[in-house]
Image (tube, helix red, strand yellow):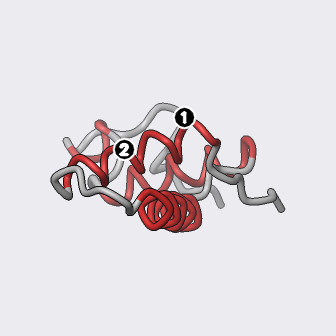
Amino acid sequence: MAVPQNPTFAQIRERAYELWERNHRPDGVEVQLWLAAERELRAEIRADPPPDGPAADASNGAEERQRHGGTSGERHGGRASGSSNAVSS
C-alpha cells in the first residue's frame, strides 16, 4: 500500500496565488488562502491516488476497455488477437 503523497511547497504556493487572484487580490488573508490551498491539494491527492505498480496499470486498462465497449476488434464484431471461439471436448 502506497503512502499518500503530500503537496509540495511550490504546489501550495501556486494554488494559494490562484486563490488570491480569483478572490480579487484581497489584503491580509495570506494565511487563510495558504491553508485553503493546502486543503484543496490534499483532497485532490486523496481523491485521485496514483496507481500502485503494474497490476494497477493492467486493471486500469481492463476498466477502460469495459467503459468504452471492449477492444477495437470486439466493438466491430471481430476477435481480439489470441482469442478463439472454438470449444474443446
- What residue is shown at x 23% (from left), y 46% (from top)? 21
* Image position of 78 with respect to 39: above or below: above
**Within 10 angstroms of label 1, few (less than 14), some, or many (20 or more) residues?**
few
Q: Which mark is residue 23?
A: none
* Image position of 69 with respect to 39: above or below: above
Circle 1 SS class = loop
Q: Nearer the viewer, residue 1 or 75?
A: 1
- What residue is shown at x 29% (from left), y 37% (from top)? 72
Farthest-out residue, left: 24
Farthest-out residue, top: 81
Q: Quadrant of the N terminus?
A: bottom right
* Residue type at numbered disc 1: Gly
Q: Earlier in the sequence, mark 2 or mark 1?
A: 2
Q: Position of residue 65 (x, y in %)?
A: 39, 50
Q: Position of residue 11 (x, y in %)?
A: 53, 41
Q: Position of residue 14 (x, y in %)?
A: 43, 39
- Does residue 3 appear left or right of residue 17 in this picture? right
Q: Which residue is mark 1?
A: 82
**Within 10 angstroms of label 2, few (less than 14), some, or many (20 or more) residues?**
some
- Does residue 73 appear left or right of residue 48 in this picture? left
Q: Is residue 53 visible?
A: yes
Q: Which residue is mark 2?
A: 17
Q: Quadrant of the C terminus?
A: bottom right
Q: Position of residue 9 (x, y in %)?
A: 63, 41
Q: Based on the displayed image, in which of its 4 quarters is residue 79 positioned?
A: top left
Circle 2 SS class = helix
* Residue type at numbered disc 2: Tyr
Q: Nearer the viewer, residue 10 or 23?
A: 23
Q: Is residue 48 visible?
A: no
